[in-house]
Image (tube, rainbow, N blue to C red):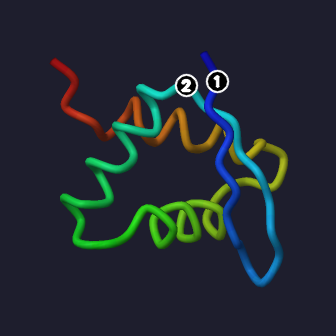
Amino acid sequence: MLEKRSLSLSGHRTSVALEGEFWAALEALAHAEGESLAALVTRLDAARDPARKLASALRVYALLNHPFG
């Protein structure tokens, strides 16, 4: 089930809907990197290809970087 969260990115509010498992993975990655979830999402948003939606960029980052299992 999708879980929608509101974030402030570059001075504007936006909402992102991801499965709870992706939010958990992103929170774990942010913690491991010594930053808040908001800081991680802001960093990924700034670095992503504008053609890719933010939710997609977050899922891909979680899949490529989280040691699942």
Residue found 71% across the figure and 47% down from its top:
54
> How crowded is the residue under tag 1: few (<14 C-alpha within 10 Å), some, or many (20+)?
few
- Spot occupied by residue 46 in the image (x, y as percentages of width and height): 65, 70
**Secondary structure of residue under mark 2:** strand
Seen from the viewer's position, the closer of residues 3 and 37 is 3
Q: Which mark is residue 2?
A: 1
Q: How many marks?
A: 2
- Spot occupied by residue 69 in the image (x, y as percentages of width and height): 15, 18
| In this view, 22 is above or below 43 | above
> Residue placed farthest to the bottom in the image?
11
- From the viewer's perspective, tell me whether residue 49 is left or right of residue 44: right
| In this view, 41 is above or below 69 | below
Seen from the viewer's position, the closer of residues 22 and 3 is 3
Residue found 54% across the figure and 61% down from its top:
41
Seen from the viewer's position, the closer of residues 53 and 24 is 24
* Residue kind at label 2, given as amino acid type: Glu
Q: Which mark is residue 19?
A: 2
